[in-house]
Amino acid sequence: MLTWVWVAVVVLALIIMGTAVMSVLGRLSELDRAARKLQARQAEAMKLQEGAAVLERSVLAVQERAELMQERVESIQAGLGKGDR
C-alpha cells in the first residue's frame, strides 16, 4: 500500500512539473514573438534614420544653393547700381 502512495506522489509531481514546463514554453514563444517584433521595429527605425540623413544632406545642399544664389543676386544688383543705400 505504501508503494502506491509513493507512485501517486511521483505521478502527481510529474504532472505538476509538466504543467510548469508547458507554462514556461508558452511564455517563451510569446517572448520570441515579441523579440521578432522588436527586431522588425529596429530595422524600420534604421531605415527611417537613413532616410532622415539623406533628407538632411539634401536640405544642406539646397541651403548652400540658396546662399550661392543670394550672393549672385547681390552681385548682379551691385553691378546694376541697385545696392543698399
Image (cartoon, helix red, strand yellow):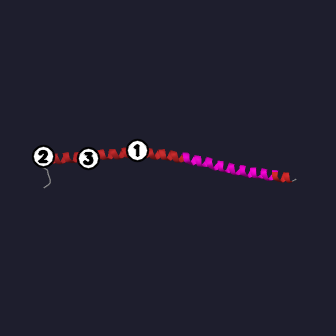
Magenta-drawn stretch contains 15: yes
Instruction: Tell me the kind of residue under disc 3.
Output: Ala
Q: Within 10 Å of the Cα at label 1, are there few (<14), some (14-19), or many (20+) other Cα atoms?
A: few
The residue depicted at 18 percent of the width and 48 percent of the height is 74
Q: Position of residue 73 (x, y in %)?
A: 19, 46
Mark 3 highlights which residue? 66
Quadrant for the C terminus in the image: bottom left
Q: Residue 36: name its quadrant.
A: top right
Q: Within 10 Å of the Cα at label 3, are there few (<14), some (14-19), or many (20+) other Cα atoms?
A: few
Whether pointer 3 and pointer 1 mark residues with C-beta atoms closer than 8 Å, the reply is: no
Q: Nearer the viewer, mark 1 or mark 2?
A: 1
Q: Nearer the viewer, mark 2 or mark 3?
A: 3
Mark 1 highlights which residue? 50
Mark 2 highlights which residue? 79
Helix, strand or loop at label 2? It is: helix
Residue span colored magenta? 7-36
Question: Seen in the image, is 6 located left or right of residue 38?
Answer: right
